[in-house]
Amino acid sequence: MSFTAPNQIKPNEETTVIVGMSGGVDSSVCAALLKEQGYNVIGMFMKNWEEEDEFGVCQASKEYADVISVCEKLDIPYYSVEFVKEYKENVFKHFLSEYEAGFTPNPDILCNREIKFKVFLDKAIELGADYLATGHYCQNTNLSGENRLVKGNDPGKDQTYFLYTMKEEKLNRIIFPIGHLPKSEVRALATKYDLATKDKKDSTGICFIGERNFKNFLSNYIALKPGKFENLKGEVVGSHTGSVYYTMGQRKGLGLGGPGEPWFVVGKDIERNVIIVERGGEHPALYCDELWADEISWVSADFKFELPLKCRAKVRYRQADQDCTIESIDGDLIHVTFAESQRAVAVRQSIVFYLTIDEQEVCLGGAMISKSGPTHYEQSL
C-alpha cells in the first residue's frame, strides 16, 4: 500500500514527516503507514482548547494519552504543541461573532485555514519536517505539473469541503496518507497494527463543545434575547429563546406543534429578533435557484477558466454535488446558478466548487454565501 508525496525528491528514509495526531484512528493509521514505508515519522499532538476553562470538554489529556500509546507502539518520537491563544483569537471569537450576527458558522473550515495548515504547519516545518501529514479524507494529486486538492476515494468521508481554503503552495508540503482508502480499510489497518485507537469512535460535532448541550454552551458567551416565531403573513405562531439557535431549514428544536405538517425555519429577521417559519419541508420559501458569494478562495492562483463555467458545487457538507454554473465574478463577488433548485441555502455557509480534471474530482476552491434567492415563494408573489 503506497501513495506519492507531493514533489518528493528524497528517499523515504531521508524524508521527515510530522503527523498531526489527534488521538483518533485516522491519524494513528497515517503514522503507521508512513512508518511502514520507511519515512522518518514524528507524531505531534495539538492542543487548541484550554480544558480547565471548560471542564475538560475536549478531553485533551485523554487524547494525548492515546497519541502516546500509538507512538510508543510504532516506536516513533512524539511531541505536544499548544495553540490555545491562536485558536481563541482566530477561530472561537469569529465563531461567536457570526452567531451574534445571526449566522451559523462552520468553525472547522476556519480551524483548517488558521490553525492546522497555518501555525501548525509552520511549527512542523520549524521542527525540521519535510512534510506534514494529516488524517483528512482527501488527496493531493499532481495534475499537469500542479498539486491539486482532490476528493478522497470514500465519498461518504471526503473532507475537501472543509479544506477549500487550502493553497497550492501549502499542498507542496502536505501528505494525506489515507485519502485513497475507505474508512472500513482504515479501521482494518488499525486492527492489523494493533493500535490503541482501533476501536475508538469517530469524533463528531464541534471540539470545544464536545458532548455538552449546545444551547447551554452558547448561553455562556452570548446574551440571548427571547423573541417570536412568525409565519410569512406576519402572524405570531410561537416564542423562541434566542434567534442565534436557529438556522435555515431547521425543523428540530423549534417547540412548535399543532395539527398539520411540521414547522421549518424559512428565514430570519435579525433586526426584529424574529424567526420566520412555515409548515412543510417542501415549502417554496425553502427553495432557490441562485446565490451570490464573496471571500473567494481558489486552491490554485494560476487556475484559468472562462465564464460562464459549468462545474459542480455543494452548499453544505455531505450534500451530493450539484450541477451549477459560475455566471460571473465581479471583484470578490461570485454569482452562481444551479441546474436544480437548492433547498435551505444558508448565508455565511460555504459553497465549494468541483471540476473533473484528468478523471480526478478536483476541488477548485470556494466562497462564503452572502445572498441567496429569490426563493420560489418570493418569485410567486
Image (cartoon, rainbow, N blue to C red):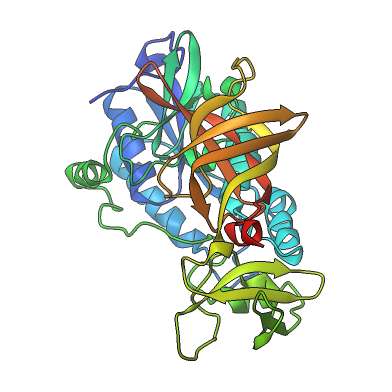
Quarter of the image where the C terminus is located:
bottom right
- Residue at 56% across, 50% down: 108
Q: Of 369 and 101, which appears nearest the observer?
A: 369
| Residue 331 placement, left or right of 19 | right
**Quarter of the figure with the N terminus:** top left
Residue farthest along the right direction in this orientation: 271
Q: Residue at x 63, y 73 (%)?
A: 245
Q: From the viewer's perspective, is residue 79 above or below residue 259?
A: above
Residue 365 visible (yes or no): yes
Q: Position of residue 72 (x, y in %)?
A: 34, 44
Residue 240 spot, x, y in % from top left: 66, 84
Q: Residue 306 sits in which quadrant?
A: top right
Quadrant of the rendered image containing residue 242: bottom right
- Determine the residue positioned at 30% across, 36% down: 32
Residue 82 shows in the view: no
Query: For this rendering, which residue is in front, 380 or 90?
Result: 380
Query: Residue reaching furthest front?
Result: 381
Q: Residue furthest bottom?
A: 258
Residue 121 lies, with reference to residue 276, above or below; the image says: above
Locate residue 87 relative to residue 56 in the image: left or right: right
Q: Where in the figure is residue 151, as x and y percent of width and height? A: 40, 33
Quarter occupied by residue 157: top left
Taking 324 as reference, is 32 left or right? left
- Closer-to-camera residue (31/282): 282
- Give residue 122's position: percent from left, percent from top: 63, 31
How many discs appear? 0
